[in-house]
Amino acid sequence: MRLERMANNTRYPVVIPDRNRIFRSMCAHNSMTKKVEELAARYGRKTDVIELARELVEEQYDISAFKWAYSPIITPSPQIGVARWGLVPYWVRTEKEAGEIRVKTFNARADTLFEKPSYRRSARSRRCLIPSTGFFEWRHEGKKKIPYFIYLPDEPLFSIAGIYDVWKNPETGEQVNTFSMITTDANPMMAYIHNSKQRMPAVLSRNDEERWLDPRLSEADVLSLLLPFDENAMEAYPVKNDFLRKPATDPSILEPAAPEQPL
């Protein structure tokens, strides 16, 4: 361990969550800085579908759930998929309900995955991989909130366990692909960083990726893959708080914060 145009055409109600209340308990910022071609090579998938959304999903230094951002997802399909962060279950009836529920489904807890109505069907048969080059969490020190960027030095592109669903807007007929990121108990490094809730994304080993997508897995098998990732394979460093105000494509988002000067 070492600490260191598609969007504009979508009719959707705007629901602004209380950011100070929500982000303390959620993993809501991912990073995916690779090109579409690199994704295809890494996962052995085709790019016909994602090509239509290339500008929305590649070289994104901060994919924010709060912005209902697009993200690439990997499913059993031979194509790389595209979905929006904040799962809307298939049974939601109205746009208003969809807008309200999606701000509550950024993350799905591993320990209640098969209990929550919003997640149950997807957990059984609609599991996905969320490609990542790193993610962000906040450490709380008194009134200070210190953002950290966490990554895998030996895996420049790794996978976080996710679930997805397809919601059909009854008013427009549009089909919307959405997903949730699964979280699990924090390992010791992540418990230090995310000290308010001690949670972390469920990072999968490369050997478990295709197994995670297998719809034949039992509930017990699914849960066995959602353990805390080895802290010795992870590194992290503080970043500047102003990264939230920068465009998602700005590489300076990942610049380390300057160390504090002693008094």
Image (cartoon, rainbow, N blue to C red):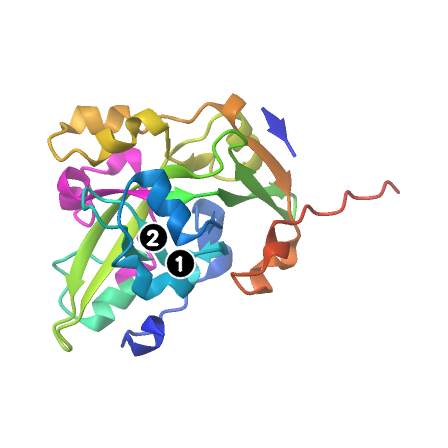
What stretch of residues is rendered in magenta?
Answer: 101-130
Count residues near mark 2 (Cα–Cα under 10 Å), then give few for <14, some for 14-19, many for 20+: many
- Taking the spot 42% from the left edge, 26% from the top edge, the residue there is 229
Q: Is residue 247 above or below residue 259?
A: below
- Quarter-wise, where is residue 246 in the image? bottom right
Q: Quadrant of residue 259?
A: top right
Task: Give me the residue at 50% from left, 42% from top.
Answer: 134
Amino acid type of the residue that numbered disc 1 sits on in the rendered structure:
Val
Of marks 2 and 1, which one's residue comes earlier in the chain?
1
Horizontal side, residue 225 vs residue 132: left or right: left
SS of the residue under disc 1:
helix
In the picture shown, does residue 206 fall above or below 138? Answer: above
Q: Is residue 104 left or right of residue 234?
A: left
Instruction: In this rendered view, identify the residue nearer to me: 194 or 169.
Output: 169
Question: Which mark identifies residue 72?
Answer: 2
At horizontal 21% and vertical 36% (from top left) the residue drawn is 213
Look at the image and say whether residue 119 sits in the magenta stretch: yes
Task: Point out which mark residue 156 bears.
Answer: none
The N terminus sits in image quarter: top right
Q: Secondary structure at mark 2?
A: strand
The reply to whether residue 72 is in sight is: yes
Q: Position of residue 22 (x, y in %)?
A: 44, 54
Question: Considering the image in quadrants, where does the C terminus appear?
Answer: top right
The answer to which of 119 and 36 lies nearer the viewer is 36
Q: Which residue is mark 1?
A: 57
Task: State the count of labels.
Answer: 2
- Amino acid bearing label 2: Pro
Find the distance from the CA under tag 2 to the CA under tag 1.
6 Å
Residue 94 x/y as whole percent: 17, 71
Front-lying residue, 47 or 197: 47
Residue 15 horizontal/vertical position (percent) = 36, 69
150 relative position to 170: left or right: right
